[in-house]
Image (cartoon, rainbow, N blue to C red):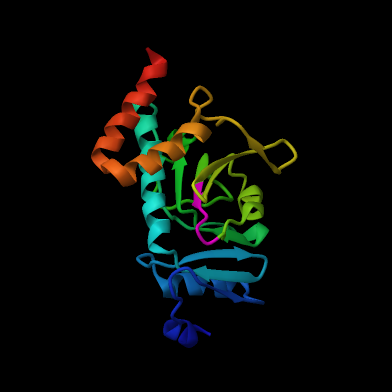
Amino acid sequence: MLLELKRLTVPPGQRVLLEEVSWNEFEIILEELGEHRAARVAYDKGTLEIMTPLPEHESGKVFIGDFVKAILEELDIEFLSLGSTTFKNQAMLQGIEPDDCFYIQNEAAVRGKDRLDLSIDPPPDLALEIDITSRTHSNIYEALGVPELWRFEKGELQINILQPDGKYAKRESSGIFPNLPLIENLPKFVRTSKAIGRNKTMKNFRQWVRDPLD
């Protein structure tokens, strides 16, 4: 299988599904694929998905991630951004690589750690998925216990918050940033960036974050 994986080419926007992949095989495949790659993986109880994002996916990922960082900086909240780190739990036979993720409330619990083990460490507080290719696996994020999942799809933001029953529910506001009307405004700033550029957009966005605090 590993020899075939090395020869495997997944065109942007496409995905490959491999069935009956054991956990040990999943671990070996991750090692063989390496950390510096364009492809994203998701593992769900024996099914492995390998997907290569489209260029517009990466652009959206960067902007949404930058907006989250700007909010946290303006609100003076410590955070740790881990990008597309692989999060996995062997006991649940599940693993995922978000487009971006953030430790916020649990930042202090993982500060300074080079490697995370979700059987011991908490999951990220916020995960981002840019669904240009509709690859979000909400059930995996639920199983891993990620409190908040944002999906940005077709120019719209969807906020999902983990409920006591372990399932996500769509909400109109973020549990982490309850005072910011993100669903309405964040997509507007993404669209604005395409017209006026990144730097001016980020300056305007930071001002927007500050305004409700005055």
- Do we see residue 112 in this rendering? no
Q: Position of residue 109 (x, y in %)?
A: 47, 37
Position of 98 relative to 191 (above/below):
below
Quadrant of the image occupied by residue 80: top left
Q: Residue furthest right?
A: 165
Give percent across and percent down for residue 38: 39, 66
The quadrant where residue 168 appears? top right
The part of the image, by quadrant, that contains residue 187 is top left
Residue at horizontal 35%, vertical 33%? 70
Label count reads 0
Q: In this picture, which residue range is highlighted in magenta?
A: 128-133
Kindly tell me whether residue 180 is visible in this rendering: yes
Residue at screen point 30% across, 30% down: 204
Instruction: Please tell me whether residue 50 is drawn above or below residue 127 in the rendered image.
Output: below
Q: Position of residue 125 (x, y in %)?
A: 52, 39
Tell which residue pokes out farthest to the left in this image: 199
| Residue for point 42% across, 64% down | 54
Q: Report if residue 2 lies within the magenta region.
A: no
